[in-house]
Amino acid sequence: MSPRAGLDKQTLVLAAAELADELGMEGVTLAQLAARLGVRSPSLYNHVNGLKELRTLLAVFGLEQLYAVMSASLVGVSGEAAVHAISRAYVTFAQQHPGLYDTTLQAPEQGNAELEEAGARTLQLIISVLSGYELGRTGELHAVRGLRSILHGFAALRNKGGFGMPLDLEDSLTRLIDSYIAGIGCMRTGD
């Protein structure tokens, strides 16, 4: 059986990303994807080896998209402004693409070079932003974990409607990142 004309991995991933954003990752099934694309589920196997591979492709795509928006946010900024820029880009991405964002959260599968590379590229971007703080290699990694935890917590609460008080969310995020920057020196290591 030959693959349907116009149907390829990229088309599948883009449609699956839309489904993830609309229905959450639980809603991304081969049956839902086939229905979205107007094909029968078995035709998808001409392009992916099942749901697991599709989710891995989504994770790579999600990391690439997150990297792109964070990288674009850094044009013309450095230092504290850069930390604020990637933070806003991260939270905005999570808000605009909640399902796709969820795919970026797990650690890359060992042995999956494409997923490892996409994760490492994003990690290196954040490390480059934090490099001016001279934290040492281990300190940079602790600082990345800290920033990621702060941003994920903020994004998750925002996405779930957890901020009900009539208080400006952008101001809250700015103050949160200012606090992170003020304390970043405690991440410094001697390596």
Image (spheres, helix red, strand yellow):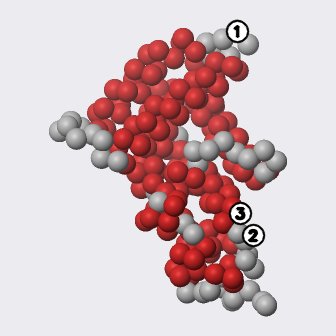
Q: Which mark is residue 53?
A: 3
Three-letter amino acid code of the residue under disc 1: Gly
Percent across and percent down for residue 183 are 47, 15
In this view, the mark in front (3 or 1): 3
Residue at left offset 39%, top offset 23% = 178
Q: Is residue 190 above or below residue 83?
A: above
Q: Is residue 150 visible?
A: yes
Q: Is residue 51 above or below residue 59?
A: below
Residue at left offset 69%, top offset 89% = 5
Q: Secondary structure at mark 3?
A: helix
For the residue pair 72 and 1, the one nearer the viewer reads as: 1
Q: Looking at the image, do the residues carrying marks 3 and 1 touch, with CB atoms under 8 Å apart? A: no
Please report whichever mark, 3 or 1, sits nearer to the chain's N-terminal start.
Answer: 3
Q: Secondary structure at mark 1?
A: loop
Three-letter amino acid code of the residue under disc 3: Glu
Q: Which mark is residue 190?
A: 1
